[in-house]
Image: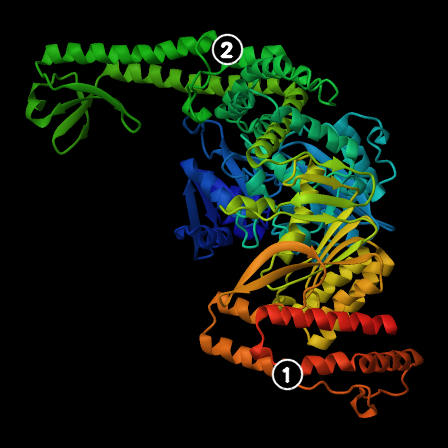
Amino acid sequence: MTEQNLASLTPMMRQYFEIKQQYPDTLVFYRLGDFYELFFDDAKEAAALLDLTLTRRGSNQGKPIPMAGVPFHSIDSYLAKLIKMGRSAVICEQVGDPKNSRGMMERKISKVLTPGTVTDEGIAPEHQDNCIVSICKGHNYYGFACLSLSSGEFKAAVAASEDKLRLLIEKHNPAEIVCPENFKPKTLTQGCACTKELAPWYFDFQTCYRALCTQFATASLFGFDLEDLEEGICAAGALLAYVKDTQHTALNHIRRISREESRAYVILDQCAKRNLELLTNLRGERRGSLMAVLDKTRTPMGQRLLARCLTEPLRDNAVVNARLDMVEALSKFEKLSELSDLLSTCGDVERAVARIALRTARPKDLVMLRATLDAVPQFKELLTTDISQVLSEHPLQNFAQSLNPPADLASLLHTAIAEIPASFLRDGGVIAAGFNAELDTLRDLMSGAEDTLTKIETREREATGISTLKVAFNQVHGYYIEVSKAQSMKVPLTYQRRQTLKNSERYITPELKELEEQTLTAKARALSLEKELFANILERLNADIEALTTLAAHLALLDMLHALAVCALERHYVRPTLSDEADITIKAGRHPVIESLTTKPFIANDVSFGKQRLIIISGPNMGGKSTFMRQIALITIMARIGSFVPAQAATIGQIDRIFTRIGAADDLASGRSTFMVEMEETASILNNAGPQSLVLMDEVGRGTSTAEGAAIARAITQYLCTHINALTLFSTHYAEITHLEQDYPQICNLCFKAREAQGKVVFLYQAQKGAQSYSYGVEVGKLAGLPNEVIKSAKAALQRKLSAPLVDNSTPTAQAPKAGDASSELKAQCASLSATLSAWRPCIQALQALDINALTPLEALNHLSTLQALLQGTKSTN
């Protein structure tokens, strides 16, 4: 808008535009009395997003100015909707008292709410972290930084490639990403609903280095082990500056920054998190996830920590064993239920402390902190008197002793904050009686006014003889005397009429006017004084904010470990053994989620990776292959976060990363077919997996022709075996893949079988050594409810396929056409294939001679056994 256009606006609208120009891409909520208003394009956008009524206020250049608004007392619900949509909002508040202001009210920006920086109760997602990430690109590396404003956790790192940077982003799943204007790769930011571009100078190394040193009150960053992370320092400094801009206050609770060590965690990309259903099921629901099973936490902060740990399993056996020690001790603790009840009294003190640090705390935050501080002595007594011996060798042996917040804080909060304060400071009644003498005097004046009103009412009734006369107050007219119209002729001449209603008249007197001025002055001064005292209390608490942040972190950890102990007891989990080798051995393992959702006994299965590093899993559809694979990965993750596991025994070795290639769907937006998505995910595994990785590959090759799919699956299996040597679970319906066991000693076969009983398929769900070639696809289709006509047609087609004579591919006419001169390798492969088929001809002829329809299931199994022996004999002679 031009200066000429601005000059034509009212002073209030000019003030609005001055603020709006600072945040052109953000919705500005501008306080006008009891409403927050939005104007122009902001009003149109907010009306569409929040279902508001679009109105108009005044005009600009002859056109009405669009306006939309929300009541000030319900602003949080609207802001929560915007944050959930990935949008941001600027809150512009009135400064000072409207009654004492002359001319236009002064307004200032109180805060900027963004998806990655919001901490307000009712707006920030309670059960998940809402961290913010910063990325940039340097000469040699990519810079990365991540900040959780709620917990104060601040990390920085560098990445050697865009793929490694993507892994860092996926690990933290940020609510918001900031990056330079000249660096915004869509492949890195497409999964985040909110991306903010900053001017390149935000990422200047010298500026960022000084900003970080200033924040932590240090001369250098050597103490944080960041000196060699130039790009990481740039990302961290820019992130710190951006967050300060949004909060409009110091970030006192951010006292340190650490190096993001990818080697400290088992890496799980988004594909693995989704396929393993760690936090939500495949439909995005909590039910049916591992989180839903393990979450016995009693506080939101403990719940968030558990979710974070599930996506960040630890590799350090010492740290994991320390957690396991604590879980074991708590599982043997006779007063575990008392501990659980005590944790419930703490609430979300982590975010309450964050709001105290940001000076946005409400009275209930201080009440929550007071309750937590009151519980600390009870925690110490409970932990030290009952389980001190069990914890004697534990890294957290001094856990109870470490719960030592400054002793005077609890006393301060009891003295300063009312037992049951008002929800909002603006309502008054937050500061406790006796804390401030002036406030007590003002309150006495206010309460004395009530007594005075009662006396005036009694006196005037007697003087006028009007028994129905009453003295009352409202916000518009102040104090008044109300008399019915039938009695109005009795009022004395000293009464001044103020308002006429349908059935009554309202009057004022000089005495009431004077009382009103005294009372309202006392009320305004009392409210102003309460705000001042509350701000002073926040400042006092900020002096010990680091101790309070540490207390919240300790209680969150205790809550999470307590939840794992409760789960271990309820579900009969056992403590896993951790190994330094890259191996996994599980005896009678169970799927933790499926076991929790079914009332039937879960059929447990064993698995052991020894010299055999790749397990090929075959068997019928719905036979349990995918469940078996997922349960091994879930048990591994549970062990690595310090949880007991659903098994009779489990030894979990060093795993650096878990890959999953399970299921696929078209990516229509990117023009990628199901098969393309499958191949890209497979390529990522083959290019990034190593000897310490756990790889789950479920029926690779289904998205193309049978011959091509089998060939690709075989080649992938061989590559995994010969080049990567990862711990691999490879399920397949291709029978030829199961034959690889005979060629590679590091491969073994497991199968899930089924049997037919009374015309129905019964799945056994038991893993056995060996291979299974028949998939029972038609039978599963029947179970799914396919029409009988379809089932009959499918069976007939399958019968014709199985009964068709096999073409002799050894003849020249049956060979595949050659494109140009065939390589010598291809010729050798063709010759070998021809020789093999010739050797197998007796077996093929015997198979063709069978009458499938006339065989009973037992006879069929006997024939299969004979054919298998014949094939094995043929192979040995070759």
Q: Position of residue 185 (x, y in %)?
A: 73, 57
Compared with residue 139, is residue 796 higher up or lower down, i.e. above or below?
below
Say what amino acid the circle numbered 2 marks: Thr
**What residue is shown with label 2?**
415
Label 2 crowd bin: few (<14), some (14–19), many (20+), radius 10 Å: some
Q: Residue at x 85, y 42 (%)?
A: 230
> How far apart in space, not on screen, are marks 1 and 2 (Cα)?
90 Å
Query: Looking at the image, what colour scheme do you see?
Result: rainbow
On the image, the x and y values in percent for residue 394 come to 73, 22
Image point 47% across, 18% down: which residue? Answer: 530
Residue 715 lies left or right of residue 537; in this view the side is: right
Instruction: Say which element carries label 1.
Output: helix
Residue depth check, mark 1 versus mark 2: number of the one nearer the observer: 1
Foreground residue, 462 or 85? 85
Q: Name which residue type carries label 1.
A: Ser
* First of labels 1, 2 by sequence position: 2
Q: Is residue 778 above or below residue 611?
A: below
Residue beneath disc 1: 803
Q: Secondary structure at mark 2?
A: helix
